[in-house]
Each structure stands twice: as C-alpha cells, then as structure tokens.
Image: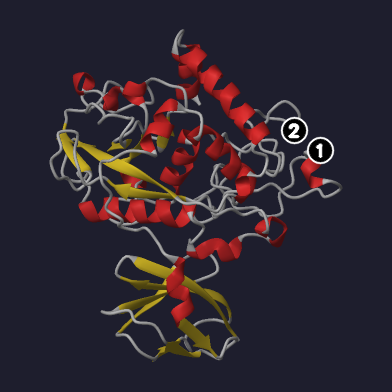
Amino acid sequence: MQAYQQQLQHPVHGRNTAAVQAAANQWLANNPNAGNNRSVITIPVVVHVVYRNATQNITDQQVYSQIAVLNQDFRRLNADTVNTPAVFDTIAADMGIEFCLATTDPNGNPTNGITRTSTTGGQLFGFFGPFDDVKASSTGGIDPWPTDKYFNIWVCELFPGLLGYAQFPGGDPMTDGVVITYNAFGTIGTVQAPALLGRTTTHEVGHWLGLYHIWGDDQDCTTGIDSIPDTPNAAAASQSDCNVTLNSCSNEDPYWGTVDPPDMVQNYMDYSNDSCMNMFTLGQKARAYSFLATDTLRIALLNSNVGCNPLGIVNTTIDKYFSFYPNPSDGMINVSYFGNLSGTIQYDVYSITGQWVKGFTAGPGNTQLNLEDLQPGVYTIRITNNNESGVQRIVIQ
C-alpha cells in the first residue's frame, strides 16, 4: 500500500488512477453481471530475474511453477478448492484469466519469456525496495519490456519482510507490473515457508487487476471498503493462522441480507498463509474485468501479438475421460480411461489442506491407485497429461 499511496500522490499518475477508477466503476454499473462472464482471456508475461548471486538466479523450472500456480488459481483449478467453506462456495469464482510466457521479445526475436540480469543490488541497503528501483537499469534492475504488450514480473531480493508489491491500474506505464521476492516465487527451488505455494504472486496480480485487500486497509468495520459486496467486512488483516471461525465484523453489505458470514480468510486478497488461500469471488472477478475493460494498458495487453507459451494453462475437458470408482473407497481406486490421450498420465493426490501426499505415473488406459495408507478423508486427484490437467475429488473411508 506504500507503493499505491505513492502512485496516488503523483501529480499525473494520481489523476490517471482516479480517472481509471471512475471509468471502472461506471463500467461495473453498466455490466452488473460481469462476474458471470464465461469467456477466458490470456495475458502474455515476461519474468525478469534480477540476481546478486547464484541462489537468487532462480531456475526456469521455478518460473514455470509460478505460471502454473497463477493459471490454477485464476481458473479455480487449484487442488485446495475443497477447503472453500460452504457459505462461500457458490460465489467462488473462476476468474477466466490465464497467463502465458511470451514467445517473442520486443525486437521480434524468439524468447522463453524470461530475462536474467546480474546486479550489485538495490538502493535500500543493497536490497530492492517498494519504490521501483528494480524496474530500471539505472538503479540496478532492468527496464520493463513494453507494458502495453507484456505483463512484466520482476523477481529479485526484496528488503527483508517484503514479499512483493504491485502497481494498481492507472500508474506509470514505465513501471507497470508486479515485483516478487525470489524466495516467495513459485513452488520449488528457493521458496521458503510460509510462502511455499506461489500465492504471493497470485495476491499481487490481484492488486495489478485492481483488487484491494478484503479488510479495506483500516482497523475497523466501518470506514474501510474493498468496493466488492460479496467479500465480508473484516476489521483487519488475517493473522496468517487460517482461523476459519473468525468473524470480526457484524455489519455486512446488503448483498448478504440477514446472513453474517465469517471473515473470508481463504481469499487471495487477505494476508493469510499460502496454505490457507484458495479463492477469489464473483464480485472480485467483476471488478478485475472492469479494469481490463477500461485501463489503457490492460486493454492493449489483451490484443498483444507477442506469442504465448501455454505452459501451465489448464484444460478441464480432460476430466470427462476419467472415471474413479468406488468413491467413497477403502483406498483401492480403479481408474477407467476412455479418451484418446497419448504419453504418460500423472496422478497427484492432495490432502484437504492442499498438500501433495502421493503421486502415480501410468500410461493411457485403465489403472489402479493404491491409497490404502492414507487416513480417511477427502482428497483431490490432479490428472496431468502434457499441458492439460483436470481434477477429481475422492473420499477415503
């Protein structure tokens, strides 16, 4: 929010931000059912890795893991959707947004969508801070690729305690994008607890799409607002403990009628740990689309011609080719396959908390999964074949 306040106070970008906000609000008023939009848009990404040492020079695979997380979270295909409370399940949204690494650089040459820059560090005691020094070569970072064609993500060593920050719609085109610290980016390699599941980037991309924190960045139930009716009022940020019974405010938006729901600590726009977050709402989807439809840079991105590597983009149609039975089961799961996929098929089993617990690899055709060593409960099985994946839920008795 420091970065956002700086944006608002700028004599030019502050006015632009206010104008974009007004246009987005008008768009929402004219499109009250935008949250029900079933279209899917794709945003091309470039990831700038800015490093001081070999550890910070994260691998391509770590970058790929983060792109996959973004696509799972923004399409609501993350395994831990099983943890969304029933009171929120009907408003949990498939945002209809996918991300891909660009395949053409600004000069028209082929690229894998990743740049690497060796640096002596940023301007804040050798670290990079929340005021955009990593976004310029002159201050130890790297200039963005054209922000009307690429969604720029910078990965670097941020000042200790800062996981990431984003630029809201309406800001300077030369600094548009998000910045994530190298040990909270993706799900493998250098990531450190509690930021193990790539949700820092999901959260910051939410800001980049115009979403506020769900508690409205104050410390009470009356003055703060995230401008979204279906996210319950909250007095403050989550304490990262995933207290699903927390209900810090009794006054709710008229959207909720006589219902007083708990705080939505599972929302990506709270400050919960990665393992707690699992949802956006239909209201948040509508607000994100209002900026995609009115902010000049974001409109341009939707028409970018820089190519797309669909790594991590998921496809739910794969689900219809599989049948898991019996379900519920005592642990021996039969898998019937009646599609035409080729190559190996990966079956990954996740617990109700979203943690990976077991994996199997099989060829096309029927197979059997032995889960007899698992405790009784609800599990999610993610099926992966090439760049396609799907999800099935099972119950072990």
Query: Position of 221 compared to 340: left or right?
Result: right
Please provide percent x and percent y for residue 36: 62, 50
Q: Which mark is residue 251?
A: 1
Element at badge 1? loop
Q: Is the residue 155 above or below the residue 385 in the image?
A: above
- The answer to which of 158 and 93 lies nearer the viewer is 93
Is 319 in front, or is 347? 319
Q: Can you tell which mark lies on residue 47?
A: none
Q: Are marks 1 and 2 in contact (CB under 8 Å)?
A: yes
Q: Residue at x 20, y 37 (%)?
A: 51
Which residue is located at x 76 percent, y 50 percent?
Answer: 261
In the rendering, at what x and y percent does residue 376 appear? 58, 82
Apparent side of residue 272 relative to residue 147 in the rendered image (left or right): right
Q: Amino acid at mark 1?
A: Asn
Q: Position of residue 341 (x, y in %)?
A: 32, 79
| Helix, strand or loop at mark 2 | loop
Place residue 121 in its image quadrant: top left
Is residue 318 visible to us here? yes
| Closer to us: 104 or 214 | 104
Query: Is residue 100 positioned above or below 371 on the image?
Result: above
Foreground residue among 358 and 25? 25
Q: Which mark is residue 221?
A: 2
Tag 2: amino acid: Cys
- Quarter of the image where one finds residue 197: bottom left
Q: How is the image coloured?
A: secondary structure
Asked if one can make out residue 265 in the rendered structure from this viewpoint, the answer is no
Taking 262 as reference, is 226 above or below it?
A: above
Residue at image coords 34%, 39%: 181
Q: Residues within 10 Å of mark 2 (few under 14, many from 20)?
A: some
The residue that appears at 16% across and 35% down in the rendered structure is 117
Q: Quadrant of the C terminus?
A: bottom right
